[in-house]
Every structure is written in C-alpha cells, then in structure tokens.
Amino acid sequence: MNEIVLKGIPAANGIAYGSAFILDKGEFIVPKRIILAHEVDSEIARFEEALNFARQEIHTLKEKVNQDMGLNKAHIFDAHILVLEDPTLLDQVSKGIRQNKNAAEYVFSKVIKKYVQAFSKIPDEYLRERVTDINDIAKRVLKYLMDESKLHDLDNLQDDLVIVAHDLSPSDAVSLYNRKIIAFITDIGGRTSHTAIIAKSLGVPAVVGLKDATLRVNNGDFLIIDGQKGLLIINPTFSTKELYAKEQSQIHACMEKLDDLKNLPAQTMDGKKICLLANLELSNEIPTIKKVGAEGIGLYRTEFLYMNRLDLPSEEEQYQSYKQITEAVNPYVVTIRTLDIGGDKFISSVQIPEDMYPFLGVRAIRFCLERPDIFKTQLRAILRASMHGRVQMMYPMISGVAELRQANAILEEVKRTLYDEKIPFDTFLKVGVMIEVPSAVMMADMLAKETNFFSIGTNDLIQYTLAVDRVNEKTAHLYEPSHPGVLRMIQKTVDAAHTEGIHVCLCGEMASDPIMAFLLIGLGVDELSMSSSSILTIKKMIRSVRAVDVQRICTEALQLCTGKEVEEFVSSQIRKLGVL
Amino acid sequence: MPHIEKEIIVANKKGLHARPAAFFVQLVDKLNVSVTIQKNQEKVNGKSIMGLLTLGAQCGTVLKFIVEGNDAQKAVEEIELFLGKQEEEFIL
C-alpha cells in the first residue's frame, strides 16, 4: 500500500497514530468497506436477501398486530413493505455497489440518508415523521447485512481510535467525551469548528478541512496525524513512522518540561500578570483543568447540558451541575455563559426555525429573549449556584445596549422572585457581556457603563467582522485572526473597557495560539481563556517575554496592513526575542 | 406498445404523499403497466414509494403521467379516478 499524505487545516496540536474509524453521521454508523470486483454480484445478492429477510420480519409483525389490534393498525406495515420492495431503491443500491465497489450496508445507508434528508425538507409534518419509519426499516436491513454488534452507535466505540468524519456536531462531541479517542480528522470545518474545540479539550490532535478524507481513508487504515502541520498520512512507510516516533518523543519531553510551569504564575519577566483561565464544556474536564494550573473558568459553555436529550434540563438539574462545578473550581471563579444555541448548535427539545443564515438568525441571547421561560429557568439555577463559590455570568451575542437592558430586566425579575421565595443567592453576582458582534464593539464605551466585565468571543467576532462563515470550508482561508480589522476591534473593546475600569477576558481559539496570545497581551487583554491543553504553552510564552517588548512589537504590528504581514512580523520578532 | 402521456391535477386534499402514496404504489403495481411520474424536471418511477414521497406533490400539483403498456388507456383512467378521491374512500 502506498503512503498518502493529505494536507488540511491544523486544528489541535500534537502527533498521534492509530487505526481509523470512519464515523458517519446519522441514525446509525456504518463503516465503509471496499469489496473486490468479483464480489459485486454476490454482494448485490446479499443485499436482496437482506431485503427479503426484513420483509419476512415485517410480515410476521404485521400478522401479530393484525391479531392483537386489528387490520387498521396493521396497515402501517404495508408502507414499510413497500419501501423494501421499492424498485428505485434496489436499483440505486445495486448501482452503487457495482460502481463504487463498496459493501452493501455502506451503499444502502448512504442511499437511505439521502432520502431522509430529502424528506426532512418537505414541508409536511406527516411526511417528516415518516423519517423515523424509514430509519426503522433501514435498521432491520442493516441488522441482516452486518454483524449486529457492529451496528454500533457512538456509545459502543472501541478505544484508541482515530475518528474520521465528514464533520462532528456538538452532540457527537458529547458522546465522544468519555471515549478514548486519540485524534480527529474531518472533511470540513476550520480552526474554530467543534472538532477543534473537542480535540483541544481532550488534549488530542486534530486536522480539519481535509475535503475528502472520509473517501480516501478506509476503516482500520493505519494513520498518522500531525496536528502541528495539519497533515494526515495514510498507510505511512516505515521511515515516516520512525520520523514521527522521534518527533513525538520530543513533544513528550517538551510537555514534561511544561509540566514544571503549572504552579508558577503566568507573569512576564518584568512582572505583568496575565490571568490564564480554562474553557469548560463538561464537568469531567475539571481534573485536567486543575492539573494545568488554570486560575478559574473563563467560559463555561452551558449548552452541552441541553444537548443529546429530548427534554429541557430542569432548574434543579442545572443547579446541581453548576453547583458541582462551582464547588470543584472554588476558590477560583466560574464564568457561566448563558445558553448559546442556534447558529450551528441545536438541541432536540426546542424547535429553532431553520434560517437561511443561521449565524445571523435567532441564536444565543436572541433566542433567550424570545423564550424567557427557558432563560429564567437557567438564570434561577445560576443564581442559586452562586451561593456555593465564585460565580459570574455573561450573555452571548449582545449586539447593543437595548439587548443588555432587556436581559438584565429579566435577571432582576428572577432575582426578585428568588428574594420573595427566600432562596439565597449572591446579590453581587457579576454580569458580563460577550463582545462578538461588531456593533457591540462600536458601542463598547456605552456597554461598559452598564456591565461588570467584557469577554471577547473571537470565534464569532472574527466571523462577523470579516463576513466569513466559519463553518463553511470554502471560506476557511479567509478566516484570519491576525487581520488588522480584527485586531483593531479588540483594541477598541479593550480601550473602552479600561476607560470604564472594567476588565477584559478573551475566550476564543485565538487565545491558544502563542503568536496571537502575544498580540492580545500587547493589546491589553487582562485574561485569556482557552482549552486546558494550551494553558501551559501560553504560560511558557508569557514567562519568557517582557511586557515592554510585547507592547512595542504590538504597536508596530498595528501599523501593518494585512493579516499575513502582522503574522510574519510578530513571529519574526518573537524569534528575535528567543521565545518559543 | 401503447404510450400515453397525460397531465393530471392532484385533487386529493392530502396530496400524493404519505399514506396516499402507499395506496398509489399498490394501485400501480396491480395495473400491469410502467408508470413514470414527472413534476417539473423531476421524474420518478410510479412503483417507487420513496421516489413518490420525494416529489412532495401537494393538493393542486400538476403531475405528468407517462404510462406504457397494453393496458395503458385503462390504467390512466384508474389513476385519474384515484387522484380525484379523498383518503377515506381508499379501499385496499
């Protein structure tokens, strides 16, 4: 087998090697399997047998229902049988097996998924509900085609696999948190995609935006993932393996050295202190966060509590989660971001209307203001948890003062009710505003008068400032954190905050890139919040520079015209200083 | 082989999807002809329930039926009759 090297976008640092597991999104996960040319006919025959088998099963079921509940109810199965007898379906699957030399189960699941997608788009409630039926039928067929134990869902994955997927959704992410995954590879996505966020919080490498990795990689292929350079190497040669083994041991040595930094302050050589905080999705990350010496949680993404379930989390359930985290992180602060759904994050319990431009649609605070019932439940839980340690809270996607006031009015109402019910809460709970919409930057001076702190969410701020969809792989190259336009946005925000005497945290992926973090410190950002896996690297950078140099280089960098110039200038200056 | 093309309006209130689609496929199966259904540029096999469902033909949609086979004339009449019926009248 020949070695294949694919170049993608580096999303999380590190080097890993192991066997590939192709994860297909949807109701069921069917690994791709290539068959030989002479196996085509028997594979098609096997598929027809599977259809027959499923038909038998449904006939038996229909008989039983007919006896128990009468003919009327049994009719539903006629439609199921019609699907199994569908000539077009049979034709499409046979063709797929013949042309692509893929196993029946893989082709079949692909064809079914296409139909399911088509049905979901038809504006008919009844028809959309039939998607469940079709998935049900598909499972019967797949059960015959595959060893049932292999028809796994995310919960039954083996350990030590490289996950290869077209894309990963936040809800996949939740299922993957407890698995031993050693790396992630996706076809689409950029540096701020969920895959990157998950990989970083798990501390494993990831390469995204590989375009067609899921087509090139076969299940079980041996892969090397180079998260630094953004490379995927399929079936590497012996010499490549050796090369990477060496590099990996160097990285390990480096990491061990970094470990010595965990109890040292994040402070420049001339004494400027930068607060390094961790981003948090799920409570089981807390031990790792403590291990790297984070000084609190700068961003707790609460939407993960709402995902992968059909109902909404109750006030009590949320309170218990927030309380547990608050107590675990005490005496450090936990910054809870109120629900940020919409955009590319969805939850099953609430229907969010499909928008043409979801990132410009009803999401985050807009959603919460439209659904005060959901918002109030969360606010109550946060306020109650504030009694158990240091809690502060922030609103995502605030676009101006009116929205902030609206949200605060609801908060006041909730506080009054709690007060009336004699339920204790921290009356001085700090409330911050996330700065991620350009209009919020322009209004930062006014917003700063009515809030306790700012938190710049660069993932979204960059997207909105540069008008670049960050989940669209076609525009991924335009997503440029070092763009002078972005840097000026950050500068304006910091200046407005400091004028009013409030502090600024920054919690995007930008904070975990040493070059960008260098610039951010120069811009005057007080706190950086990032995945725990990046904290020590950034701390090392901070401890090896002087604030005066950072300031000087940053001022010069702001005079440059393009993102590329900025990046080249700053990295050359950092090299000159002998850092990194 | 007789070949008939005819445009018929779906008069069934619920359109030609979901349950009516299942009945329709069963009807075509009995007719012993080949039926192709065209909506705009999209063509599907009349015996394919999945194809029919993806057309999403609601009440009032004009569909073109291309019928081939010895009993084509009779088949078109039956189809026309079916599309004028409401769901409660379907008998299997």
Image: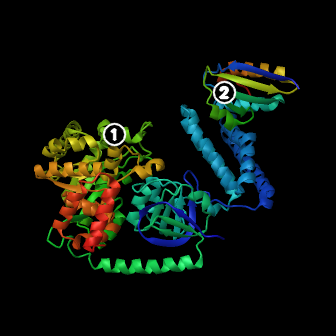
- Label 1: which secondary element: helix
- Residue A99 position (above or below residue A227): above
Could you tell me residue A118's position as x and y percent?
A: 59, 39
Q: Which quadrant of the structure image shows residue B83?
A: top right
Measured in 3D between alpha carbons, the distance from the residue under mark 1 to the one under mark 2, in whole angstroms, is 38 Å
Could you tell me residue A375's position as x and y percent?
A: 29, 43
Could you say which disc has been placed on residue A354 in the image?
A: none
Q: Residues within 10 Å of mark 2 (few under 14, many from 20)?
A: some
For the question of whether residue A338 can be seen, the reply is: yes
- Residue under pointer 2: B39
* A524 horizontally vs A352: left or right: left
Indicate which label's residue lies in the foreground, 1 or 2: 2
- Residue B19 position (above or below residue A260): above
Query: In the rendered structure, are the residues bearing label 1 and label 2 in contact, judged by CB atoms less than 8 Å apart?
Result: no
Q: Chain of mark 1?
A: A
Residues at discs 1 and 2 both on one chain: no
Residue at screen point 73% across, 43% down: A63
- Name the foreground residue: A90 vs A558: A558
- Residue under pointer 1: A367
- Label 2: which secondary element: strand
- Name the foreground residue: A380 vs A106: A106
Q: In which quadrant will I find the N terminus of chain A?
A: bottom right
Could you tell me residue A80's position as x and y percent?
A: 68, 41
Q: Chain of mark 2?
A: B
Residue at screen point 42% across, 47% down: A344
- Name the foreground residue: A327 vs A508: A508
Q: Amino acid at mark 2?
A: Lys
- Residue B90 position (above or below residue A403): above
